[in-house]
Structure formats: C-alpha cells, structure tokens
Image (cartoon, rainbow, N blue to C red):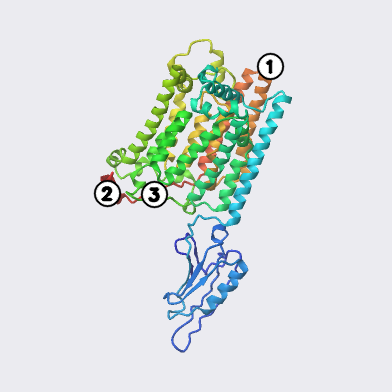
Amino acid sequence: MVIFPNSPLSYSTSNKNNRWEGFPPLVCRPKPNPSGCAKTREDISLVFTKTSESWGERYQIRTSNDCTVHKLSKYNSLKRRQEVQRLLRSVRTSAVASDPIRIIPTISAQNTRLPAFRIYFLAVLTYLSAILRAFLIIYGEWQDTHMEVRYTDVDYLVFSDAAALMSSGKSPYDRSTYRYSPLIAALLMPNSFLHHLWGKFLFSASDLLVGLFIHKILKLRGVPEKLCTYSTMVWLFNPFTFTIGTRGNCEPIVCAMILWIIICLMNDQLVQAAVWYGLVVHLRIYPIIYALPIILVLHPLHFQPGKKPALVDWSSRKSKPIQDSSNFRITDLQCSWVFLTSIFTWRRLVFGLISGSIFLILTGLCFYFYGWDFLDEALLYHLTRTDPRHNFSIYFYHIYLHYEQEFSSLEKLISFLPQFVVQLVLIFRFANDLPFCFFVQTLAFVAFNKVITAQYFVWFFCLLPLILPWSSLKLKWKGLACIFLWMGAQIHWLMWGYLLEFRGKNVFIQLWMASLLFLASNIYVLLNIIRNHAYCPVFKQLKHENLNKIMKHD
C-alpha cells in the first residue's frame, strides 16, 4: 500500500489499473534475511500526480517504524522515477513484509501555490484578453462613425452626459433616462476632461478583475489548476462578456464586487463583505436577492469562535445529482427550536447592521445632494418600472398596449410574485452551496423580470465559471444543446427586434412569441443545470453536538 496522508488519494497496489502516468510498477519479492529482519517488498506502483500543483512537492519515503527517512527533492518525472526506485530498494525495516511503505508529501496536497509556468500562463491569458478588449474599444470608435448599428451602448452615452453634468456642478439626473447611483457618474467624470474612452477602459479593467476573482474563488475551493484555467477562460474569452465592458456598460464593476464579497465570506472577512454588500446594493438594487442566502450561510454550524471556517474541498464533491443530495435544508436541523434560536447570531447581526448602515448612509448622502430625483430615478423607478420599448421580457407587449393607461401599484408589483416564489424555493434549497445559489437565483430573476436587456445576462455569466467544476453536464451533447437552444432563442428574438427597430415592420406579435420561446429556453437550461450539478457546500458543517457550545458563545 502506498498512502498519501492529508490527501484524498489512497493508492492500492492490488489494483493494476490504478497507475498514474509517468511511473511503471516496481516489483519486489519478500525475502527474509538471516537476522530476522525483512525487506519491505511488495508490489509497489509509484503514482505521479497529473495536477500541476504537486509537480514541485517534496516527498519523504519512510519505513513502517519511521526509523529511516529518505527525502526526495524536486525532479522531473524521469529523474524522480529513477531516484524513487533506488531509494525503495534500499529501504529496510524490522517489520513484516506486509507492512506499508508511506510516501509522505512534506508540502500539503492542499497547497494552493502555483508553479511558475502556471502563473505565467494565467498572466498570458490575462494579457491576451486585455489586448482583445483594447482592440474592441478602438474598433468600436470606427464602427460608431461608419456603420448604421453603433457599437457603443446607449447607456454609455447616458453615463458620459451625467458625468459631464456632475463635473460642472449640476445634478446627473438632469440627463433624462439616467437611473443609476451618482457614484457611477462620478467614476466617469474623467470622460469630460481626460478622454471620452476612460469609462470603457475602466469597465474593461473591471472585466479582467472578474476573471482573476473567478480563479481565486476556485482555488480557495480546491479546484485543480487546469479546471481553474478553463473556467476562467469561459469568462475572459466569452464573446458576450468581453463586449459588455467594451461597449461601455457598467455591469463588470458590479460583478467584480459580488465576486469579491464571496471571497471575503470564504476568508471570514465578515465586516469587509458587509461593507461591499451595502455598496453594491446601493449601486445596483438587484443584488438585494443575495441577502437571504448570505444570512443563511452565516450559520453557527459553519463557524467556530476564533477560527476560520473550514472550506469543503472540490475533491470531496458528491457524484450524485443535486436532487439526491442536499446538505443544507431547514429540516436538517435536529429540531425547530434549534433553528429558531440560531437565527439571531452575532455574525448575522453584524453583517446585517453593517451592510444596512452602508446602504442607508450612501442613500442618505445622495438624497441630501440630489433630493427626490435620486430616490425616484435610482431606487423607486426599478421597483415599479414599466418600459414600453421592446425587450426580451414576456411582459413587454402587455406594457406596450396599456402604457398610456395608469397602472396601479398592485399591477406594477404583481409581476414580482413569480420571481418571489422562485427565489424562495431556490434559496432554501441551495443556500449552502453559495456560488451555485447565486447563479440559479440570478438566472431565474432575469428570466422572470419585467424588463430584460442584454446587459442583464452578464449578471449570471460572471457566476457561471464558479459552478462548472461541479457540473456533470458534458459539452457533448446536452451541453451543446443547452448552448444552442439559448443562443438560438436569443438570435430568433433579435431577428424580429431588428425588423421592428430598424425596418419599421409591425411584428409585435411575432416578437412577443419570441419572448415566450426565450423564457422557455431559460427555464430548460436552468433545470438542466440544476439536475446535473454535484452539490458541494462552501463551508464544512460542524457536528450537531458542538452547536450548543457555539450558540452559547454567540
């Protein structure tokens, strides 16, 4: 037996198929010597890890009584094989021939430091994606002046105008259709005195930061470097995502902040996570849907007083589909009173108070400077928004037909009911697997929203790479079917939208039918993702017998 302590690997020599590439088996036969000692000789197949983080590990080869230690330094595969074979032949022990030889990594298998070439490869990917985004920003300038369809998002023009008003001491809400926090306009104030492309480069830089945060989160969860790289590339080289920032949309900033909140929670930086959460909800109101899963994941079963929470490693993921394995449900608690007494803990109170205070302070300051214009445009408008222009939502046609009539508050809010019900179901089902819960929440929220524009898709695209290592949805064939169905439904809608917008054809019925098809495709993709996801909570749960001690401390 060759045993790797502190590692999910346990290699048995009886299984001839358990040989990792790089090392042929070394076969020895028991042969006792006259002194009564025996060489520990058994069929030994030395394993060679495929994951890059183990290439630089140092190993110790010990006999069963630990009286002899041989150190194996960093070698390439050929030198390592020769050295190990030489050392194993020299190992002697007083134990019987069936005792194991232990090969002990002196650097833990959980070490997340990357080899140099992996760091360089990640840097190369980042540089290439940065060059691509810079090229698209420059190309967008050419397309805006030479083609009928502009490359620059109309929101970027709104941002720039609002920033120019702020730099001249006026209110950004003097610009019609500016319905964002004044902080966004403040970030783009250099557009008016430095260069009008400043905002695009700022948003694209945030886009790159999202890729680095994706890689960081996956490494914290113990995902192998190869999978981390592939998942990061899904964001960096996704045609949809790299056009969002280069067209001048502010969503990459919001996405980067949401991912940073996840990193802070995983590192037990509760105060910092609360500050950023209050800020991101002020900037864009939609992250308010993440409040309940964050509160639920801050459960006493995940945290010990004075200690960082233990993260569940990727290698311990469950192979069964999600419907058969849910590790966090309200019924998992031993009794209902335990759940009720565990609601108000100091972590939850601290997060709620700090994030709420940050949100109220920023909102109060903006209200002080800009009055009801800010409150109506940046907050209240999004709660009762009725947009008569065509968009991906199934509600657009009804709003278009009845826009001149005054909608009651009940009619405006009733569209939130499907969203509300779906959100509650997803939260209480998947809250413990926080990145996955965020993803399915956001996808469902966008699919059932009253207004859906293309920029909303980036809300869940930034979370998609965080769930790919736990998905059994293969690219061939079901994965491709989901991709083509979603893209096909979107292209089908865009065809009718182009005929309506640029050709002036009366195709409202066809466009509304295309919206229904797009909603169906979103639901189909969401269900397939849920069915093929291997449930893996972010934090390890403590034993229930330790809960009472923690509750007393809280």
Q: Quadrant of residue 430?
A: top left
- For marks 2 and 1, give the CA distance: 69 Å
Residue 549 is tagged as 2
Observer able to see residue 409 = yes
Amino acid carrying mark 1 in the image: Lys
Q: Amino acid at mark 2?
A: Lys
The alpha-carbon separation of the residues under discs 3 and 1 comes to 59 Å
**Is residue 316 or residue 243 the one in the foreground?**
243
Q: Quadrant of residue 83?
A: bottom right
As helix, strand or loop, the secondary structure at mark 3 comes to: loop
- Which class describes the residues within 10 Å of circle 3: few (<14), some (14-19), or many (20+)? many
Identify the residue shown where x is 45% and y is 29%.
282
Q: Is residue 83 above or below residue 141?
A: below
> Which numbered disc, 2 or 1, marks the residue that appears first in the sequence?
1
- Which mark is on residue 505? 1
Horizontally, residue 343 falls left or right of residue 72, namely left
Q: Residues within 10 Å of mark 2 (few under 14, many from 20)?
A: few
Which residue is situated farthest in the bottom direction here?
Answer: 34
Of circles 2 and 3, the one toward us is: 3
- Mark 2 or 1: the one toward you: 2
Q: Earlier in the sequence, mark 3 or mark 1?
A: 3
| Residue type of the residue flagged with mark 3 | Pro
Q: Give above or below for 440 relative to 61.
A: above
Name the residue: 60% across, 73% down: 82
The answer for how far apart the CA atoms under marks 2 and 3 are is 16 Å
Position of residue 231 measured from the top left corner of the image (x, y, whole percent): 57, 46
